[in-house]
Amino acid sequence: MDWVALRLSIELALATCLLLLPVGLFLGRALAVRAFPGKGLIEAALALPLVLPPTVLGYYLLSAFGAAAPLGRLWQDLFGRPLVFTFEGLVLASVIANLPFAIQPVQRAFEAIDPDLRAAAACCGMSSWRALLRVELPLAWPGVLTAMVLTFAHTLGEFGVVLMVGGAIPGETRTIAIAIYDRVQAFDDPAAARMSLVLLVFSLATIAVTFFASRRIGRRLG
């Protein structure tokens, strides 16, 4: 069992969730309650990672993060190290690849809130921020929780984007999915089976806890 790769995968998933939580809340709510020109195009662009093959998305990210690209050069100038084949590059790639998982459940949760509740909060003198914290977020919380768990679980199992952007550097970019692939390539089926089972159990437990928490929250709010 490659515990270093598993730890790296968990760290990557946690970092991705931490960065995408505010992004998902802001964009999810904005898309749910506002109408503006080009909204459909933005929603389509944010959903692209769902339909693009991971290797295609990984190729474009690799090109964008490379030393010849503006983003790659800027990162190199600021931090003195390349963005590709580093943990930081994996985090940024994972954030982009998981945008639909972090945004769409939040958007659907805010869309389900009765607009009259927002109007009532405004009539009571609540500011938009206070209404968000006191009225909307408690109602949308199951969707937010679902978004974070989907992001976490998807990051744990991500393979194509991780391989393209990070490669398989032990202790730096070699995640558990890459480790499983390496063991299969080496015909080490017992090791691949053990790591696959650990990943399966971990992912199943994470999703089960989320469903349980969502039901509890839903009953409490109801």
Image (cartoon, rainbow, N blue to C red):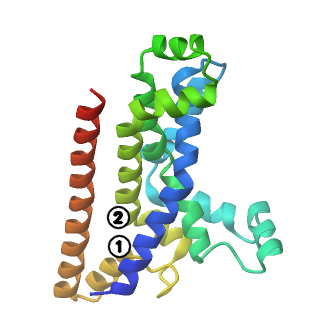
Q: Residue at x 51, y 25 (%)?
A: 32
In the picture, which quadrant includes the N terminus? bottom left
Q: Is residue 30 among what the camera can see?
A: no
Amino acid at pointer 1: Ala
Residue 9 is left or right of residue 187, and the answer is right
In the picture, which quadrant includes the C terminus? top left
Q: Real-space Cα distance between discs 1 and 2?
A: 6 Å
Per the rendering, the mark at residue 157 is 2
Circle 1 sits on which residue?
Answer: 177
Q: Residue at x 28, y 50 (%)?
A: 210
In this rendered view, identify the residue nearer to me: 166 or 197: 197
- Image location of residue 22, percent across then percent down: 57, 47
Amino acid at pointer 2: Gly
> In this picture, is 199 found above or below 182?
above
Mark 2 element type: helix
Q: Residue at x 58, y 45 (%)?
A: 23
Per the rendering, the mark at residue 36 is none
- Image location of residue 154, percent across then percent down: 37, 57
Q: Could you tell me if the residues under marks 1 and 2 are in contact, i.e. CB atoms within 8 Å? A: yes
Q: Residues within 10 Å of mark 1 (few under 14, many from 20)?
A: many
